Image: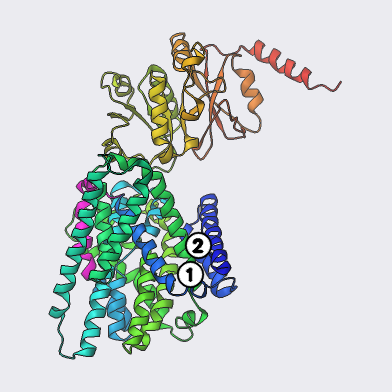
Amino acid sequence: MEEQALVIALVGVLGIGAQWIAWRTGWPAIVLMLAAGFLAGPILGIFNPERAFGDLLEPMVAIGVALILFEGGLSLDLRELRHAGDGVWRLVIFGVPVGWLAGSLAGFYVAGLVWPVAILFGGILVVTGPTVVMPLLRQSSVQKRPSDILKWEAIVNDPIGALCAVIAFEYFRMTAERPGATLFEVVPPMIFAAIIAGLLGYFAAKAIAWSFPRGAIPEYLKVPVLLTTVVAVFVLSNKIEHEAGLVAVTVMGIALANMHVSSLRSIHPFKQNIAVLLVSGIFILLSSSLSLEDLAYIDPRINPGFILFLIALLFVVRPATILLSLLGSSVPWNERFFLAWIAPRGIVLVAICGLFALRLTELGYADGNVLIGLSFAVVVTTIVAHGFTINWVARLLKVKGDTRPGLLIVGSTQWSIALAEQMASLKTPVMIVDPSWQRLSAARKAGLPFYHGEILNEATEHNLDLAPYQVLVAATENEAYNTLVCNEFAHEVGRDSVYQLGASTAEDDRHAIPPSLRGRALFESGFGVSDVNDRQQQGWIFRKTTLSDEFNFDDAQEKLPDTAHMLLLLRKSGRMRFFTHAARPEPRAGDTIITFSPPKARSAEEMAARKAERGAKVQPT
């Protein structure tokens, strides 16, 4: 009992710690988690999950993988297929058999595996995995079409790869029992089982979509009911056929995402947190469960063919799969070459290999044990190779998206248009959102990017790509609406990155909105909507001042009028740090200060007098 509790605590600390270091350094989180698991398990022997959990380890990992695939399915919007569909369906219909064939040939001729093991492993290799692809895409800011193709491939092909492995195993098991067995005796029942599992997942999604909006489930029970349903569907589908549960939960997630159930919006933060915890925990558990004996199977001094196999996987199998599958498609060649390089493997590959390694050994195939170490070698090699090169390859092939943090402004007003123009002049991506076409006329005249629609409408999150925008400013004429917008998007862009104009100074405190509900207030003074509008009418403008070693923050303040108000600092990297009533960023050389100030700056005489006054204040007494 105490050992299990200690292992759970250590897995959490190592997994979340690796995620935090990845956030601070920009390194691929999966690489750090694998390294942490290797160190804690086979290298230092701090804990052994198999000893601590015994037979419970396999179902724990299996249910965790199922929840991850369900969460991934919830991120798939069928409307994305309007742009990426040509590439997605080709990678499913053509990519799976081509990848299976190429991986099997490489396993037999290069790695030296016996045919049954090579064929089964080739089937598993068609998976990539959302647990590794999604973090890489978030860190690298790839353009939308190749990003969508990789995301769909990762989520849809995971259960398909598992079924390929099941088909191969069942065929070899049947032929071992009855030498005259044929594929026809194996494949149709497997396809039928997958269809039944998919229908089970779909009808489970329909039940959730019907019950949640009608109040059949109280709000506090929605998350428990949803998670319990996912686990139940997964287990029941696996009773129909091994690994069919992965198909069921993936279909359930995709179906539920495209039924547009408004009640699910409130559980988005929870499901994202669950996904982070599960990915962290499973990677640590699996990598720490690896033994030195498993690693010995892939020692290049013993099996040099395994190194050649990994090279073939990177430079032959994946490129052949992508380029052959996308022949004649509408996907541009630079995107095809990018897709041909990026294919990191993750949890599903390791989990399925661990399951079938034992079963193959029981059937008498000695190479079955090799799959455990080889699957980890594939995961480490692909994650390191693709994780550390994705940015460089994306830039080389010109599929890199905008890497500077963007600013999303809700509300088209004279003040917000002026702010957007200033930020756009500093190369910051901006977007103005407003439901009024008439109010957006100023943005159109200024040539600013805009979105005509209601930001709180559920359709907006499907029609407007929010990924480039790391900061939101709500600046409509309605303070209550600004608060509502900040609350709605706090979970998506971060509570510390949603801002709104503060309560107007003339506002009656009795009608003030509680600070706990609001976004962060812009300006140290907490200017409200009417405050900035009044000053805008008086001719106030936004100014930009770049700091250097010779021209510091104090010098910048001397140049500005006394009534000027600091709004934000723009770092060289494009990161925005706002001056608020609760926080004052530390200015440094290279920063650009954006201020809202009267149109008249200080004269040279006023600046000299202010400087002399400041010097007198610091004279020793």
Placement of 260 over or under 18, stated as above or below: above
- Which disc is residue 33 wearing? 2
Quadrant occupied by the C terminus? top right
Q: Amino acid at mark 2?
A: Met
Residue matched to label 1: 287
Tell me if mark 2 has few (under 14), some (14-19) or many (20+) residues whose alpha carbon lies within 10 angstroms of its own.
many
Queried whether the magenta region covers residue 79, the answer comes back as yes
Queried whether the magenta region covers residue 449, the answer comes back as no
Magenta residues (range): 75-97
Q: Secondary structure at mark 1?
A: helix
User: In front here: 98 or 70?
Assistant: 70
Placement of 238 over or under 572, stated as above or below: below
Does 434 sit left or right of 325 as displayed? right
Q: Earlier in the sequence, mark 2 or mark 1?
A: 2
Q: Cβ–Cβ below 8 Å for labels 2 and 1?
A: yes
Q: Quadrant of residue 209?
A: top left
Placement of 199 over or under 604, stated as above or below: below
